[in-house]
Image (cartoon, grey):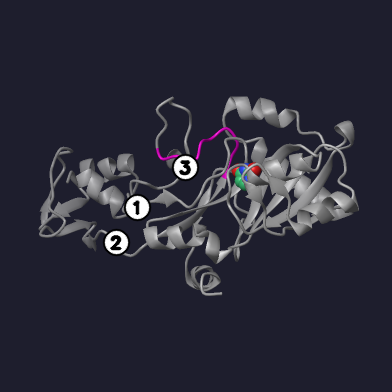
């Protein structure tokens, strides 16, 4: 493996930063300073150090949360060359990172990633019923009767949905949720910024809906709200099981560890 790639994967710096560490003469391999960028190392044998401190590849699984902007596809590479989520997470450092499920191109908010394939698989398993919470800006205002249909479970073209927890937000809660949603929607690709300008709460009697579902079918929330006559203008995910998006900046990520990771694992045991 190339030394700069090793350094990036071990978390010493970004790929470019690792090259700078090398050319600055701060990197040693088995005690010998290496400045040549093409140099190779064998991580099983060689001892690599930066400023005399040994760096190693981590083999512990890593899980992280991203605040996905709109206009970014949930794939690790896109044959059509569209911006994809891979460019927003540290794949150099954690090469096995993979998104846990997907959000639509224009859906924003919480997207989890993990190098732990088993954890990802379990969190998506329909029998585990991990709850996901979304904030949706919708056309019109759903009536109590329409909300009851969603709460009971509704017939979609791929079958009945499980009961959902759904409410129309009002007052301060609606304003706050709308502000979070538009802040994230305004980041991202130029086409998304254009799209975000159209997100107007007052236009055409729109309302802000909180919806919690336990499934992960394709475009499920959009289809559910459409089925009761309230198409989604914008969708934003705020929670995945016990993990909350919180104050994560649009396009930024943070590692999930400690108590949060334990809570995520225990959500699977329920
Ligand atoms: N439901 C949707 O309709 N879209 C998403 O991106 C996620 C859930």
Q: Main secondary structure of the magenta part?
A: loop
Residue 6 located left or right of residue 242: left
Vertical relation: 17 (above or below) 132: above
> What span is colored magenta in the figure?
68-76
Residue 38 in sight from this viewpoint: yes
Q: In the image, residue 136 lies at what x, y percent? A: 74, 45
Q: How busy is the neighbourhood of tag 1: few (under 14 within 10 Å), some, or many (20 plus)?
A: many
Q: Which mark is residue 88?
A: 3
Camera-nearest residue between 96 and 120: 120
Image quadrant where residue 53 sits: bottom left
Q: Are marks 1 and 3 in contact (CB under 8 Å)?
A: no
Vertical relation: 152 (above or below) 138: below
Vertical relation: 57 (above or below) 261: above
Q: How busy is the neighbourhood of tag 2: few (under 14 within 10 Å), some, or many (20 plus)?
A: few
Q: Are marks 2 and 1 in contact (CB under 8 Å)?
A: yes
Q: Residue at x 13, y 45 (%)?
A: 40
How far is disc 2 from disc 1 in space, using C-alphas?
8 Å
Q: Are marks 2 and 3 in contact (CB under 8 Å)?
A: no
Answer yes or no: disc 3 within 8 Å of ligand 1. Answer: no
Q: Which mark is residue 94?
A: 1
């Amino acid at each position: 493996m190339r030394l700069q790639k090793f350094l990036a994967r071990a978390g010493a710096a970004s790929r470019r930063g690792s090259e700078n560490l090398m050319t600055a003469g701060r990197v040693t391999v088995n005690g010998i300073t290496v400045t040549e960028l093409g140099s190779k190392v064998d991580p099983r044998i060689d001892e690599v150090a930066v400023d005399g401190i040994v760096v190693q590849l981590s083999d512990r699984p890593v899980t992280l949360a991203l605040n996905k902007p709109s206009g970014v596809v949930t794939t690790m590479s896109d044959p059509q060359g569209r911006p994809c989520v891979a460019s927003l997470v540290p794949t150099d450092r954690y090469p096995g990172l993979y998104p846990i499920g997907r959000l639509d191109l224009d859906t924003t908010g919480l997207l989890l990633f993990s190098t732990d394939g088993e954890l990802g698989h379990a969190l998506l398993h329909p029998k585990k019923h991990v709850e996901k919470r979304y904030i949706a800006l919708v056309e019109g205002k759903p009536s109590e009767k329409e909300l009851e249909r969603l709460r009971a479970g509704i017939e979609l073209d791929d079958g009945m949905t499980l009961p959902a927890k759904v409410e129309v937000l009002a007052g301060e809660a609606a304003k706050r949720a709308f502000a979070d949603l538009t802040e994230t929607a305004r980041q991202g690709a130029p086409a998304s910024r254009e799209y975000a300008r159209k997100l107007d709460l007052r236009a055409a009697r729109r309302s802000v809906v909180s919806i919690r579902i336990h499934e992960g079918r394709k475009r499920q929330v959009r289809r559910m709200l459409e089925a009761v006559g309230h198409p989604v203008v914008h969708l934003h995910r705020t929670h995945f099981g016990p993990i909350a998006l919180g104050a994560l900046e649009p396009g930024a990520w943070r590692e999930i560890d400690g108590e949060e990771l334990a809570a995520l694992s225990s959500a699977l045991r329920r």
